[in-house]
Image (spheres, rainbow, N blue to C red):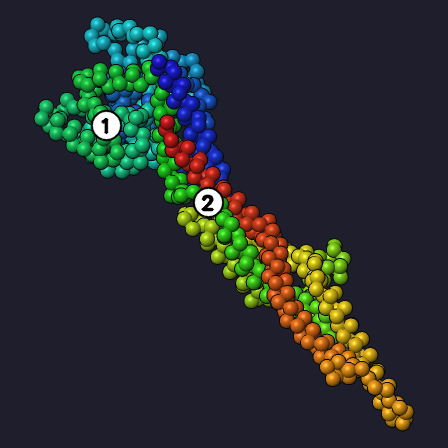
């Protein structure tokens, strides 16, 4: 059962480490590398530790000067391996006491511990006192794969000792903190070591050494005070072992807890899991609620703003005026319609007439973007970025805004291409234009016939020839009716067609604006929306990865 539980813990740790690494990859380039230091450290330690012996549990013995770490190690091992002297510091370099040597060498190399002592086969963790040098036979597998490390004092006056302690505090599987009645409340112990390890409660042991120096009441009071301090640092369930390396008080209980940890073989996994918790906490400030992808409303609003910024109103005005010009050229009064041809086609002047320019040119004759237009495009992209990044935390908020704004120079060029490829002229002739044109020519013909007829009659009268009687309609001579009717009807149809052309031009303008906005939307999707959406997806993936890394189950 214990083996299966250990395998399950290892599998969960693997998932958490993979998720943490994914979060680290996604955060690179967004989160400052210095702020990712804890993540890099955990991933590096986890990779190294998991490649080394999983059969060994490394228990580091930490403590301040004079706490009796070396004496405690000697008492637990029944040896005098650790040097104990009156002059301090006594431990200059780590000492490793090893049970079951096989597989421990590479692990100790990684820990940079060269001073090693291998316990004889069958040697227990805690010898039975008395009976000379005879040691009690341990149960098979009781202390198998155990490494005890005696470390320098963390408050040593030798600076190198502090470096060794800090390094190994980040590497060992279990941290056994030894203190004494005089230094149990030492600020450097609690503030610099135990407080930052609040998430590591499962792999921390606490021993109050030199308990033989206190009366029973004083020992109870000191123990209670130490527990309160530990609880305030997040170690509320920590058991304080009151021990004495001199008379053996409490050593059996401490040794049994160490043996239990070794038997479970989960200390290394538990330590790394606690390290992952620390790394995850360092990433939490960069996580927030997941963001939705750019909505249709936001994309449409961006396209509308970009359309305004690219001078869409001027283009649509050219479409309207060109439509009315074309309508007048077909439906206007033939006598005056030629005047319209004197005005340049607004669309052709902007190089927007389909077929007027070869397709590979793909450019319009719109004015080059000026400061005002560039500012409008920048404002449109900035507004879009602000809308998308609302709810995100830094530095992701800035990253999303920058992704939306970064393509501005390219976007200006692409927007002109989008205008150039928009069809402004397809279906430009309305069905009624030919009908009106035929009517205008009929009215012109009637006018010409009427005027010619009247001219002939006038000529006959001028030459004193008999003038034949003209037919009449409602008392009005037909020649006069043709001449006047042709002029009036032509002008009236022209006025009516102009009104219809204005209406059609407005409808054409709206239709073309939709085409233009669709073309601009296509460009904006590729140049601006795509990068911003990718950044949002990256942020959401980061949040999800941190969430998976934080999940212990």
Q: Tell me: 408 left or right of 134.
A: right
Left or right: where 299 falls relative to 93:
right
The mark that comes first in sequence, 1 or 2, is 1
Dots 1, 2 in contact, CB < 8 A: no
Give the x, y percent position of residue 381.
52, 56
Q: Position of residue 199 (x, y in %)?
A: 31, 32
The residue carrying pointer 1 sits among few (fewer than 14), some (14 to 19) or many (20 or more) residues within 10 Å by Cα, namely few
Q: Is residue 342 visible?
A: no
Residue at screen point 44% across, 21% down: 52
Q: Position of residue 417 (x, y in %)?
A: 66, 57
Mark 2 lies on residue: 292
Indicate whether 534 appears above or below 325. Answer: above
Q: Quadrant where the N terminus lies?
A: top left
- Say which element carries label 2: loop
Looking at the picture, tell me which residue is in the foreground, 371 or 350: 350
Secondary element type, mark 1: loop
Of circles 1 and 2, which is in front? 2
Residue 2 has which mark? none
Q: Residues within 10 Å of mark 2 (few under 14, many from 20)?
A: few
Circle 1 residue: 237
């Amino acid at each position: 059962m214990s083996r299966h539980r250990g395998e399950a813990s290892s599998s969960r740790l693997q998932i958490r480490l993979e998720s943490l690494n994914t979060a680290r990859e996604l955060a690179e380039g967004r989160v400052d590398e210095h702020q990712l230091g804890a993540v890099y450290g955990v991933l590096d330690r986890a990779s190294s530790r998991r490649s080394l012996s999983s059969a060994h549990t490394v228990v580091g013995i930490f403590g301040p000067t004079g706490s009796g770490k070396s004496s405690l190690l000697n008492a637990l091992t029944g040896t005098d391996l650790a040097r104990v002297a009156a002059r301090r510091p006594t431990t200059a370099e780590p000492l490793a006491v090893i049970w079951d040597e096989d597989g421990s060498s590479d692990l100790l190399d990684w820990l940079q511990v060269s001073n090693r002592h291998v316990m004889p086969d069958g040697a227990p963790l805690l010898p039975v006192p008395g009976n000379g040098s005879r040691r009690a036979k341990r149960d098979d597998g009781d202390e198998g794969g155990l490494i005890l490390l005696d470390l320098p004092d963390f408050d040593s006056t030798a600076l190198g000792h502090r470096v060794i302690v800090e390094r190994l505090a980040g590497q060992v599987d279990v941290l056994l903190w030894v203190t004494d009645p005089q230094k149990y409340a030492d600020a450097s112990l609690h503030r610099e070591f135990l407080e930052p390890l609040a998430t590591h409660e499962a792999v921390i042991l606490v021993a109050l050494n030199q308990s033989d120096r206190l009366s029973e009441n004083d020992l109870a009071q000191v123990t209670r005070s130490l527990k309160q301090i530990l609880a305030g640092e997040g170690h509320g369930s920590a058991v304080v072992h009151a021990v004495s390396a001199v008379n053996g008080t409490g050593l059996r209980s401490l040794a049994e807890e160490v043996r239990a940890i070794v038997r479970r073989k989960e200390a290394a996994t538990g330590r790394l899991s606690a390290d992952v918790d620390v790394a995850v906490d360092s990433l939490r400030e960069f996580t927030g609620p997941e963001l939705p992808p750019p909505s249709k409303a936001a994309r449409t609003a961006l396209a509308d703003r970009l359309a305004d910024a690219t001078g869409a109103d001027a283009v649509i005005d050219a479409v309207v005026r060109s439509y009315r010009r074309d309508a007048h050229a077909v439906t206007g009064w033939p006598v005056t319609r030629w005047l319209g041809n004197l005005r340049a086609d607004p669309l052709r002047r902007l190089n927007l007439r389909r077929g007027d320019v070869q397709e590979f040119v793909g450019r319009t004759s719109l004015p080059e973007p000026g400061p005002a237009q560039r500012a409008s495009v920048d404002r449109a992209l900035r507004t879009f970025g602000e809308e998308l990044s609302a709810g995100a935390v830094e530095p992701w908020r800035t990253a999303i805004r920058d992704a939306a704004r970064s393509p501005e120079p390219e976007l200006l060029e692409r927007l002109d291409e989008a205008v150039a490829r928009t069809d402004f002229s397809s279906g430009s002739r309305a069905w009624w234009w030919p009908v009106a044109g035929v009517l205008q020519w009929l009215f012109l013909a009637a006018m010409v016939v009427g005027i010619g007829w009247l001219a002939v009659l006038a000529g006959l009268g001028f030459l004193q020839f008999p003038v034949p009687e003209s037919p009449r309609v409602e008392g009005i001579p037909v020649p006069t009716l043709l001449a006047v009717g042709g002029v009036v009807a032509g002008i009236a149809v022209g006025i009516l067609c102009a009104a219809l052309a204005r209406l059609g031009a407005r409808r054409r303008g709206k239709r073309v604006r939709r085409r233009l906005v669709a073309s601009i939307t296509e460009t904006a999707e590729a140049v601006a929306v795509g990068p911003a959406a990718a950044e949002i997806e990256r942020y959401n993936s980061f949040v999800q990865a941190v969430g998976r890394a934080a999940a212990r189950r």
